Image (tube, rainbow, N blue to C red):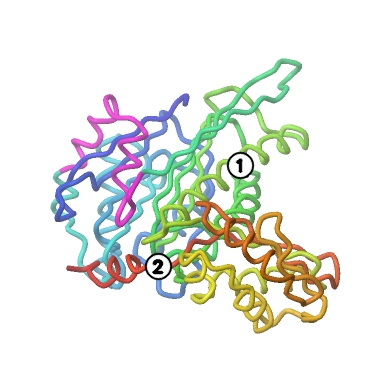
Amino acid sequence: MKGFKFAGICAGIKKSRSLDLGLIYSEKPASAAALFTQNQVVAAPVILGRKIMEKGMLQAILVNSGNANCFTGAQGIAHAEQCVELVAKALRIDPEHVLVSSTGVIGAPLPIDKIEAKIPQAVRSLDSCTIADFAGAILTTDTCTKMVSRNGKINTSGEEKSFTIMGVAKGSGMIRPDMATMLSYIVTDADISSSLLKQALTHAASRSFNRITVDGDTSTNDTLVCMANGAGQAVIDNDESFGVFQAVLDEVCYELAKKVVKDGEGATKVASITVKGALTQQDAFAAAEAIAHSPLTKTAIYGQDPNWGRITAAAGRSGATVDQNKMDLYFGDILLVQNGQWQGKGAEEKAAEIMKKDEISIVLDLNLGDGQDHFLFCDFSENYVKINADYRS
């Protein structure tokens, strides 16, 4: 990746003494776009970040894990602003080009002294760390880092130019984004305006991060950011180049979102639910969302039980128009329900074999229209309860 540097260090915020302070730095100011949580309870860095992103330019992002800096009042805002000033001073850049993010426990004051003491080290580490270090520094209950990189090629002034889009994400629990995931940062060396970047990012999120759930809870800190510094010389300035850029960004966001679901707290399986044949796209979304959020569906998947009644019942209570006598339901390529009728023990046994896989595809055809939508979700296991029961202790 051209023109970007990364750092991830230990600032002593987490009790585990693991990496907990990450920094992204662009060697020159970059076009930027961001999407934030739609939760009405928001963290201080989100409040500040919304203001900073109004100008669509960034050069650095500081992220701490282990503390959400949420429900911390005026002091939390002051601490977020202090982080901005400290990073800007250490990097000798404009404070208006610095974004801060936090993730972790809600309600505890941000340990600003620890962060202030370690920002100089984070800056020095930009020359020795990699994006993997940054990805590790933003984790909380995650069991692994989440990184994706893809390349694209476009024609610029009659010459073929390549660009790269790299993304990292964190998220394992409290995942039901209404814009993004808990935290995700994407960088590209393509040259694109902030307005076009916002358009592309919004589209990509709608097909990826806005279509995943682990537990149905929207975080107070959800942040999705993309920076484009133009260091690769590929210029995105017409419909053709924008289409190529959009396709690559869509893929990066989808793969990151899938990694979040796969690493869901206590998860053992990833499932996709596609609802098609709905009267409207809105109906398809409503039905898919209800199925993906259903604890009964999620526990049946954990138990490897193709309990089709739970899926059809969730669709029926979703608010979408359905006709139970027209529903077709597939587990993988196995037709288990046709025109609302169970296809027998043999079909169920085949569907049960599908349920043993790590990744499961479910399709519900309402056979009423052309509306279609999807969700990615995971199962519920005993470990989800244990992780969240012990989270603050």
Please provide percent x and percent y for residue 56. 53, 47
Front position among marks 2 and 1: 1
- Other residues around mark 1 within 10 Å, as few (<14) / some (14–19) / many (≥20): some
Q: Is residue 62 left or right of residue 323?
A: left
Is disc 2 in contact with disc 1, using a CB cutoff of under 8 Å?
A: no
Circle 2 residue:
220
Disc 2 marks a residue whose amino acid type is Thr
Chief secondary structure of the magenta portion: helix
Q: Residue furthest right?
A: 369
Residue at the image position 75 percent from the left and 63 percent from the top:
372
Measured in 3D between alpha carbons, the distance from the residue under mark 2 to the one under mark 1, in whole angstroms, is 26 Å
Circle 1 residue:
251
Asked which secondary structure carries label 1, the reply is helix
Please provide percent x and percent y for residue 41. 40, 74
* Quarter of the image that includes the C terminus: bottom left
Q: Is residue 58 left or right of residue 372?
A: left
Please provide percent x and percent y for residue 217. 44, 71
Question: Looking at the picture, does residue 159 appear above or below residue 87?
Answer: above
Q: Earlier in the sequence, mark 2 or mark 1?
A: 2
From which residue to which does the magenta span run?
118-144
Residue at the image position 22 percent from the left and 69 percent from the top:
390
Disc 1 marks a residue whose amino acid type is Glu
Q: Nearer the viewer, residue 91 or 72?
A: 72
Q: Is residue 344 left or right of residue 307?
A: right
Q: Is residue 238 left or right of residue 268?
A: right
Question: Looking at the picture, does residue 282 appear above or below residue 182?
Answer: below
Image quadrant of residue 271?
A: bottom right
Question: Looking at the picture, does residue 217 appear above or below residue 11?
Answer: below
Image quadrant of residue 147?
A: top left
Question: Looking at the picture, does residue 3 appear above or below residue 300?
Answer: above
Q: Is residue 134 magenta?
A: yes
Residue at the image position 32 percent from the left and 56 percent from the top:
102
